[in-house]
Image: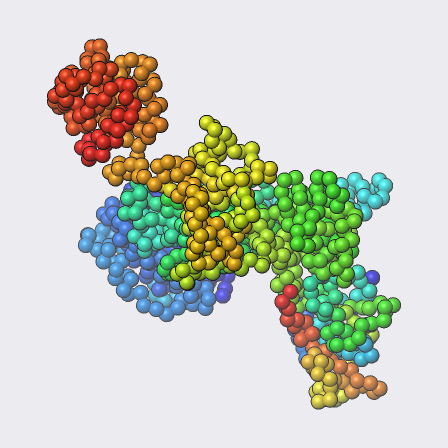
């Protein structure tokens, strides 16, 4: 079952953000205990729990592949990517689907929440105390009223080096 | 770049390519009027459109070329190699400019004056008949999908001024994909990406149709069934139709080759003829792109390394022109492409030496390898036996890349070579890559697809001894005994590390396992899986870039039930398990043969024969190691022999060897055209060691005993054994002048019985014998021009006796200087005297066989003037 969200037009490379107005509109999601966000224009779909086929001989970040309306999507486990412990067994995880260079990827996260547009004034660059692995994939932080929102850089998240099999 | 220019670039490139082929054709046959008109028309069109678009540089060069061609067309010039060469240069320049135009949108700056001067110089020296090369109104009917014809004819000649920016104003709209009205040509130009999109959509339609069919199968007949059937049929037809749009004739990949071969033959000073048949055979566009380069490379190799120079070919008795034959045809679901040359073939000795020096095989392995397997070493990376790296080839990067590229698309390359006669490659590739039949299997709880084309058979093996197909273990590695072959096995579970426990392999020993036998090039191997489902048509989708490096997968697909599964690549699997396509599983622990640097160390072949003491023979003496099935060994006249390479080879058994095994190991020794086999018990190894014979026993078959590899080893006396098979192994069989040819002997004998008795005797002694029953018939042969080396003639014959015959022969004619031997029942001094006086070289009694042989040998030892 997939929940549809807005709205990247089909066929367009949605990681390119056009119009700075929307640059800070984010889809928020939970990975572990941390609230994160990705630019709304990068997101093609939000999916509920899916049947994911394991792919042998791939690095641990690759959870496998899934079938989205006839197209094969590579699922990337963000918990592994961000060096977090594996989720509890009963957790049904959701995915955020993005497209880069014609290939579809699904970012596997704990849950997907709402769309937010935090004020620009609350944006700050990565503090030096941010753990290395987060700093690698984060493009900044929003200071919300009660917590921090880490903005994830999708391109860097998906820059997976092919390991020697 | 605007549409007008991009259309121009496409079309002009096509025309230039066509011109290439046509000019090469014309050079070969200067009188070919049809080709000449085609050439002129093409150049004219190119020039015309250049002028129309205000492309000054292009127009000038084309104009100069057209001048030359005009002269040729009018018969004022002949299309010599030099002329064609300069015109081809002009074409190359045009190509260059057009490429620059395509890249930047404007003509690149450059100076063509030298080239134009050369072309004009060619054209001049004659009366310039044509004032202006105004396009004759007749030469305009080229069906171009552009409305150039609408323009007044005179315009191109006057539109030379570059200031004419772009005469786009008068251009009627809708240039792209506009169906033109000219010449009833029912074609349309469609962008490649449009077709790709169409293909993708159709693939998805096929997948969805498969899903629907799967659902319908599980339900009873409902109202949906009939429309679904109809939909299914239409989808199949649609799929077929769209696939057809992707099909292109292989001639498209070949069209650059005539020019290539022409340039090659000029560069290397060889005469090469390229024959292409089956150019209209169609294959998928994608596949075509991928084989273009491999084909070019192989043709280059043939021309550079395969074919000899005219002088070498003459010396070898071949025609001076070397031939390269290209042949393409459909077979099964594949397209077969053959590339053959009639050159010198692969130098197998050089390949053996190279393989040895690179540690790819040991000496013993090489000895046992059939020739075609040795030839396959050329597919090894970095393997080039070319002594010099020429600009054309020899860098050793070629053939392995060719093989890899072809295997990447699911094809195979086979090779056949005969030294002195030529080499031929056969490429087999699937017709299309997009939709394939695949066998669905399960291993480790996951499903996978294996392309049906690679699957040879499915086997269910049990570990019950006595069943026909049993999995056995050699050194812990599982192998399958299938009928009479041993197949290497690999567990898919283990290979893909699907289940954590390696004990999965042990568990499979108890239950029944399924093995998929796949063919990888010339090898077969078996893949152990847990379950086998059915065969499905799947749409191959490339894997995501992060997974492209995993060679075991060639793609992934979506099954009818919506599941995503990986498609296995048998080539990748074979490579991963170390099973080279060049041969069977290699024993990794064998060290490569070391190059012998210590002069005193000699490679020795160790074997066992008769007793426990190891025996040895210098490896250099041994030609080959063979293993004959015992039922091939035949017996004649109390001797053992075997049919080997088309002849009978005598076998000598070392004393005391066993006779029980199903096959007999044999050491083969060869000298000139003689071969003999020494039967032994077991071939043990090849060792390099000093050969110092210490003890001599006086045993005639042994030279003595030496310490080899730390053991007392009997060294055999090879000379003793070979002379037991052929007494005259070491004597020269023929004299120098006749080389290996059997001497030709004419026997004249009227007595039928004697003649028929002598013929096989003389033949067995090594002569090529012709027998006639009278002097008259012999003379007929002489007058017909038949040549012999020696003549034996009976003396007492009716009609013409021997004395008269020899007198006639000696007096005149072609045979007057030949040795003539008289054969007679009467041996008396007077008879001998008379015969000698008449001209006989020698006189032998009929009953004295030895004397006759002796006499023949003596006579033939004298140099003969035939």
Residue drawn 62% across the image and 58% down it: B576
Work out which residue is located at the far right of the displayed protein and give it: A90
Residue drawn 75% across the image and 70% down it: A77
When the figure is inspected, residue B582 is found, relative to residue B661, above or below; the finding is below
Residue B134, quarter of the rendered image: bottom left
Percent x, y of residue B801: 19, 14
Residue drawn 85% across the image and 71% down it: A88
Residue drawn 71% across the image and 58% down it: B494
When the figure is inspected, residue A53 is found, relative to residue B481, above or below; the finding is below
Query: As drawn, is A11 to the left or to the right of B148?
Result: right
Look at the image and tell me whether residue A52 can be seen.
Answer: yes
Look at the image and tell me whether residue B235 can be seen.
Answer: no
Residue B321, quarter of the rendered image: top left
Percent x, y of residue B826: 22, 15
Percent x, y of residue B375: 47, 49
Query: As drawn, is A34 to the left or to the right of B116?
Result: right
Asked whether B449 or A37 is in front, the reply is B449
Work out which residue is located at the far top of the displayed protein and give it: B798
Query: As drawn, is B259 to the left or to the right of A98?
Result: left
Marks counted in the figure total 0
Asked whether B664 or B149 is in front, the reply is B664
């Amino acid at each position: 079952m997939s929940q549809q969200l807005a709205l990247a037009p089909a066929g367009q490379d949605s990681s390119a953000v056009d119009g700075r107005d929307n640059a800070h509109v984010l889809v928020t999601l939970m990975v572990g205990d941390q609230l994160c966000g990705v630019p709304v224009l990068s997101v093609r779909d939000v999916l509920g729990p899916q049947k994911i086929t394991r792919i042998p001989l791939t690095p641990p970040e690759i959870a496998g592949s899934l079938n989205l309306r006839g197209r094969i999507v590579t699922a990337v486990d963000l918990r592994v990517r961000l060096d977090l412990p594996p989720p509890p067994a009963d957790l049904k995880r959701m995915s955020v689907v993005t497209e880069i260079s014609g290939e579809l990827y699904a970012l596997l996260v704990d849950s997907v929440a709402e769309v937010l547009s935090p004020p620009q004034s609350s944006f700050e660059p990565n503090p030096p105390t941010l753990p290395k692995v987060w700093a690698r994939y984060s493009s900044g932080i929003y200071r919300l009223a009660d917590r921090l929102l880490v903005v994830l850089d999708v391109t860097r998240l998906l820059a997976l080096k092919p390991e020697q099999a | 770049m605007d549409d007008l220019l991009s259309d121009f670039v496409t079309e002009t490139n096509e025309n230039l390519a066509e011109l290439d082929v046509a000019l090469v054709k014309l050079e070969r046959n200067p009188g070919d009027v049809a080709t000449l008109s085609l050439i002129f028309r093409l150049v004219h069109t190119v020039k015309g459109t250049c002028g129309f678009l205000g492309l000054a540089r292009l127009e000038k060069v084309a104009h100069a070329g057209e001048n030359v061609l005009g002269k040729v067309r009018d018969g004022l010039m002949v299309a010599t190699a030099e002329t064609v060469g300069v015109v081809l240069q002009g074409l190359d320049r045009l190509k260059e400019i057009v490429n620059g135009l395509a890249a930047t949108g404007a003509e690149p700056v450059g100076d063509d004056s030298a080239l134009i001067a050369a072309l004009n110089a060619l054209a001049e020296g004659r009366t310039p008949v044509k004032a202006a090369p105004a396009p004759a109104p007749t030469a305009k009917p080229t069906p171009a999908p552009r409305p150039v014809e609408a323009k007044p004819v005179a315009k191109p000649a006057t539109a030379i001024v570059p200031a004419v920016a772009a005469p786009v104003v008068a251009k009627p709209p809708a240039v792209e994909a506009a169906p033109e009205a000219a010449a009833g040509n029912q074609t349309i130009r469609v962008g490649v990406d449009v077709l790709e999109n169409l293909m993708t959509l159709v693939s998805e339609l096929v997948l969805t149709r498969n899903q629907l069919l799967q659902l319908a199968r599980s339900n009873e007949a409902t109202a949906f069934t009939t429309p679904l059937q109809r939909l299914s049929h239409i989808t199949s037809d649609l799929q077929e139709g769209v696939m057809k749009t992707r099909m292109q004739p292989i001639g498209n990949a070949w069209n650059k080759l005539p020019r290539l071969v022409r340039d090659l033959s000029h560069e290397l000073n060889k005469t090469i003829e390229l024959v292409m048949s089956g150019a209209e055979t169609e294959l998928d566009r994608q596949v075509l792109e991928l084989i273009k380069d491999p084909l070019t490379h192989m043709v280059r190799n043939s021309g550079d390394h395969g074919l000899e120079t005219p002088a070498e070919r003459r010396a070898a008795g071949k025609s001076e022109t070397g031939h390269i034959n290209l042949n393409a045809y459909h077979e099964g679901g594949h397209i077969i492409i053959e590339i053959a040359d009639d050159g010198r073939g692969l130098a197998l000795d050089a390949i053996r030496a190279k393989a040895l020096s690179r540690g790819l095989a040991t000496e013993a392995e090489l000895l046992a390898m059939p020739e075609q397997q040795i030839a396959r070493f050329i597919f090894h990376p970095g393997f080039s036996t070319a002594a010099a790296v020429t600009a054309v080839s020899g860098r050793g990067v070629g053939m392995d890349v060719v093989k890899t590229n072809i295997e990447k698309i699911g094809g195979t390359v086979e090779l056949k070579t005969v030294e002195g006669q030529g080499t031929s490659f056969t490429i087999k590739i699937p017709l299309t890559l997009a939709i394939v039949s695949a066998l669905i299997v399960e291993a480790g709880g996951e499903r996978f697809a294996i392309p049906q084309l690679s699957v040879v058979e499915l086997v269910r093996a049990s570990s019950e001894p006595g069943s026909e197909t049993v999995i056995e273990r050699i050194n812990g590695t599982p192998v399958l005994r299938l009928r009479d072959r041993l197949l290497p096995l690999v567990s898919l579970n283990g290979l893909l590390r699907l289940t954590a426990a390696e004990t999965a392999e042990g568990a499979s020993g108890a239950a029944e396992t399924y093995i998929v036998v796949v063919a990888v090039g010339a090898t077969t191997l078996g893949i152990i899986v847990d379950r086998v489902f059915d065969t499905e048509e799947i749409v191959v989708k490339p894997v995501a870039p992060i997974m492209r490096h995993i060679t075991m997968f060639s793609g992934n697909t979506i099954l009818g039930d919506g599941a995503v599964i990986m498609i296995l690549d048998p080539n990748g699997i074979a490579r991963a398990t170390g099973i080279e396509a060049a041969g069977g599983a290699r024993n990794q622990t064998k060290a490569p043969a070391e190059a012998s640097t210590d002069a005193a160390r000699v490679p020795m072949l160790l074997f066992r024969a008769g007793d426990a003491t190891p025996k040895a023979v210098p490896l250099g003496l041994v030609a080959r190691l063979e293993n004959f099935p015992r039922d091939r060994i035949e017996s004649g006249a109390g001797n053992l022999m075997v049919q080997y390479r088309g002849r009978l080879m005598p076998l000598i058994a070392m004393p005391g060897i066993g006779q029980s095994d199903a096959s007999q190991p044999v050491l083969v020794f060869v000298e000139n055209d003689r071969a003999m086999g020494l039967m032994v018990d077991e071939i043990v190894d090849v060792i390099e060691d000093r050969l110092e014979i210490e003890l001599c026993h006086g045993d005639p078959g042994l030279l003595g005993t030496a310490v080899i590899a730390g053991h007392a080893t009997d060294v055999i006396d090879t000379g003793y054994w070979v002379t037991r098979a052929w007494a005259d192994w070491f004597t020269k069989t023929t004299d120098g002048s006749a080389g290996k040819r059997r001497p030709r002997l004419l026997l004249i004998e009227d007595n039928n019985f004697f003649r028929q008795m002598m013929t096989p005797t003389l033949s067995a002694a090594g002569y090529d014998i012709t027998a006639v029953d009278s002097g008259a018939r012999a003379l007929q042969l002489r007058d017909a021009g038949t040549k012999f080396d020696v003549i034996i003639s009976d003396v007492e014959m009716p009609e013409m006796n021997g004395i008269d015959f020899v007198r006639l022969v000696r007096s005149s004619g072609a045979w007057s200087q030949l040795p003539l031997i008289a054969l007679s029942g009467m041996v008396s001094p007077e008879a001998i005297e008379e015969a000698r006086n008449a001209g006989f070289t020698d006189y032998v009694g009929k009953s004295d066989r030895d004397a006759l042989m002796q006499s023949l040998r003596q006579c033939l030892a004298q140099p003969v003037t035939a």
